[in-house]
Amino acid sequence: MKFFTVFLLFCGFLVSCHAQNPLPLKPNKFSQNHILRRIYDFQDKRNTDSLLFYLTQPIHEYRLAAAVALGSVQDTLAIAELWRVSMQDTSVAVRSAAAFAIGQTGSSLAESRLIFALERERNALVAAAILEAIGKCATIAGIEFVAGLRYQSDTLRLGQAYCFYRAALKKAIIDGILQPLISLEGTFKVSELLLLSRNEVVRVIASAYFARNRKLIKEPDYKHQCRQLAQFDSDPVVRMHMTQALEFHQDDTSFAVLSNILKREKDYRVLVSAFRALKSYDLSPQERSERIAQEAERFFSDQNLNPNALIALAEMCQSKSLNASEENLLIWAQLTENYRARALLWGAAATKNINAKNRITDLISQTKKPYEKAALITALPLESVNANQYLELALNKNNPAVVRSSAIEALQNLHNETDFIQKLQKDKTFAEQILKLLILAVRSQDEAVSGLGAAILRGKDLPYKALLNGQYTFLEEAAQHFSKPQDVETYVEIAQTLAYLNDQAYVAAIAKVNQKALDWENISRIKQGQCVLMETSKGDIVVELLINETPLSVANFISLIRQGFYTNKSFHRVVQNFVAQGGCPRGDGWGSSPDLIRSEFTQRGYETGVLGLASAGKDTESCQWFFTHCPTPHLDGRYTIFGKIIIGQYVIDQLEIGDKIKKIEVLDN
């Protein structure tokens, strides 16, 4: 015992010394390897031919780098050579990467090749990668083929689950209808995987399949499975997905299950799914409405309720399905201190009482908090009488960007309302008045106001095209103004409107975008395992940056940090059970940094606590990024992943729109 005590003390001494003198981080893989740099240069330039050359090189590391690089290029001309590699390469990692790259093309022409490779592959990891690639390239025939396969290995079951999930993200004409690519056989197999597998990831992807396709999967057996797993599964992510899958069941038994979840569930993500699902139910019967009202009051009184759950609760309470009384809505609004929840409840009350509407209008003019003002603007009832107020708020350059963009977004939503569309069609004078203000919006040179102002003009049931009568100079001038790389999102909106007005098909050729060049001297200084500390108004977050996987994105992020670019910026977008997004210089999602960078797609997937780059389409990444609340596999291979949370997931889960990024610091070692 004495020896053991001395040994423990000695170990403690060593740990203490290590904490005071941490081991230095290793150089990244590009630091001294000029061949890897060259391969990455070809990836950045989207040079397929040069990357194909490196697929044939004797050094495994170079073949692997080239295969992964082609996953970002997404060139169908590479399929044949990638297929050869997926069949013949001696390296498991290279064969898997080649399958990934084929899947990234999304080409149904690759399906038969992939099935051929699958039938001959003996390594489970490679076979799983091929199965996932089949899902990305699938036709209904491919899905039915995979549904007929029976595996005992969890690795292969995961490949199957991904196959069906990826296929359902595609659209295909089935029974004469364009819909997600799902089949009865595939759905049965996913259900089987969910019940038989004990692997956490297999079950998460299988349950995500049911959540994503909840409109289409209504067979009684699956309803029972959803109800059971939503209540009793040990994994909160599976419970979250299966609760979400109950949204379109809308029967008494499923309502009882959702009510039970509200009483028992502790994980905020499951509660969010329950609140969202209940919005689709008929909650007007007295017994249901009273039960929901009781639960709502209990939750609104809970000061510790996660803000994401609180917003979802308020969205449920404002829904037409509940038709809550004005009295209840105002009582609930008094119970909560969350400004977004209050605004949602006041907005619902405003549809029932002019005094509540006037209260919102007064608060819009009184509050000095930009994000609260934006929430109140969004809460105003979508009525014709508010159109001018929206435009006045949007065109006032003294308003913060988030206020201007919220106002023009509200006007865009108003243009989707049947009553407003009919008023525009019947009242030419009114339509001409709104059009004049929309032309001012397009000319405003504000990214959001100009872009969304232009988007409104291409509404097919609106009279604006006839009223403009071919006079589109203001749009052409706006397109010229927003031709810089950082304005790509606004430019696309204007270009789409011009194409519509000129009766032309929109061609996705945007203004010339000059992506930021690779700076290898700077990249070589960034170590493997490099971390940053993000100080927010809700707490600190430590993130490890993935320099070996996404060097351009990491280098660009660190460069902006060192310029102080992110200091005192805000989290401008928080979507429950999805992401918390920040980094916009405008604070509303329409801002950018001067340089755009190219997408860097890898085999890494979007798990909980991943840091990804926002974009307006492939190769338009810039300064905005997001953290994930939970697994979001539909983003895999479509948005760059360049970091992962080491400390602070709890902080991510508490973030709200308007929370501050105080500063970000690059940590030593």
Image: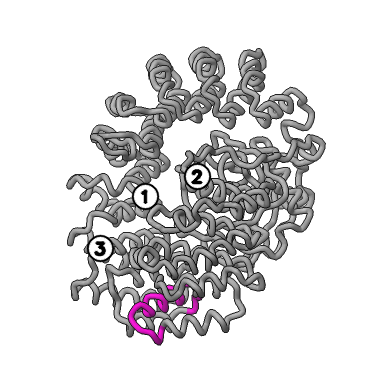
Left/right placement of residue 25 relative to residue 256 reads right
How far is disc 3 from disc 1 in space, using C-alphas?
22 Å
Which of pointers 3 and 2 lies earlier in the amino acid sequence?
Answer: 3
Left/right placement of residue 606 relative to residue 584 reads left
For the question of whether residue 135 can be seen, the reply is yes
For the question of whether residue 610 can be seen, the reply is no
The residue sitting at 54% across, 50% down in the picture is 493
The nearer-to-camera label among 3 and 1 is 3
Of helix, strand and loop, which one carries label 3? loop
Task: Tell whether position 339 is magenta.
Answer: yes
Q: Which stretch appears magenta? A: 337-356
Image coordinates of residue 13 in percent, x first then y, are: 74, 51
Give amino acid for label 2: Asn
The nearer-to-camera label among 2 and 1 is 2
| Residue on which the image places disc 2 | 502
| Residue on which the image places disc 3 | 281
Query: Mark 2: few, some, or many residues within 10 Å (few <14, many ≥20)?
Result: few
| Residue on which the image places disc 1 | 238
